[in-house]
Amino acid sequence: WTNLQPIGSFWFLKCKVSNITIVATISYGEELEPMLKEHAVDVLLLDISVPTSAENNNIYPILYLIPKLIDHYPNMAILVISMHSQPTIIKNIISAGASGYILKDDRQTIMELPSVVRAIASGSIHFSRMALEQLNRKISPGDALSPRQLEAISLCAAYPDKTTAELARILNVANSTMRNLLSGAYVRLNVHNRPAAISKARKLGILAMEESFFSKG
């Protein structure tokens, strides 16, 4: 466990009283839901900078994904281990439903990861000390985005070539609802179009920077 490096992938863990079993690992976001259909998972370890697919290097829309997983798998806990320390990202990930957030550089907590995983599997919520320190800092103006607007912007960043209608189908909302979500986000971000919204969200720390999944620390 001391050399565990789950950055840039999803890890599926099955936890018993004293044992932890890695039942699967994947490297692309679009592989996640098919894998969950094949395995019973107690704790999902994930990085928020995973590419969408082998053909699509845009970061998978994690702010859209987490609420969906919580809805479909209410007994599964999600623990994020990431290099991203922006307080807005951490707050939005936790607000989306994750059970914990650990910074990759927080080596003390990484050393204690088995205990953290067992605690989360039992229903606890865990922040590493460094993540808590970041949360205590001032949140950016982008924190004003609603959870649904965050999901919409997250999808836009992952699938920049899809139309609004196509994104609406993924989010399972009407085309008009998707347009309203995006227009509302544009107003709050003070931008005029989708590319500018994605760029502004990354600068504010709402979304992870697209090149970050290449970094292994």
Image (cartoon, rainbow, N blue to C red):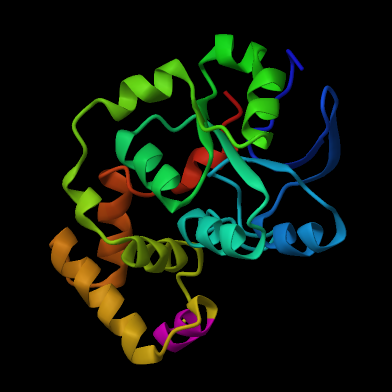
Where residue 147 appears, x then y in whole percent?
35, 60
Q: Nearer the viewer, residue 119 or 83?
A: 119
Q: Which residues are magenta?
A: 163-169
Task: Tell me what residue is drawn at x 35 percent, y 81 percent.
Answer: 178
Task: Tell me what residue is drawn at x 63 percent, y 56 percent.
Answer: 74
Q: Is residue 171 left or right of residue 198?
A: right
Task: Tell me what residue is drawn at x 66 percent, y 34 percent.
Answer: 122
State the predominant SS element of the stretch in magenta. helix
Q: Taking 135 as reference, is 90 above or below it?
A: below
Looking at the image, which residue sits at the far top? 108
Quadrant where the C terminus sits is top right
Q: Is residue 118 visible?
A: yes
Asked whether residue 122 is drawn in magenta, I would say no
Where residue 20 appears, x then y in whole percent?
82, 29
Quadrant where the N terminus sits is top right
Where residue 15 appears, x then y in whole percent?
80, 34
Q: Is residue 147 left or right of residue 81?
A: left
Asked whether residue 168 is drawn in magenta, I would say yes
Where residue 215 appears, x then y in whole percent?
56, 32
Q: Is residue 160 left or right of residue 122?
A: left
Q: Is residue 101 left or right of residue 4?
A: left
Q: Nearer the viewer, residue 79 or 85?
A: 79
Q: Is residue 208 visible?
A: no
Question: Which picture quadrant has residue 109?
Answer: top right
Figure label count:
0
Task: Tell me what residue is drawn at x 31 percent, y 34 percent.
Answer: 87
Question: Which picture quadrant has residue 21?
Answer: top right
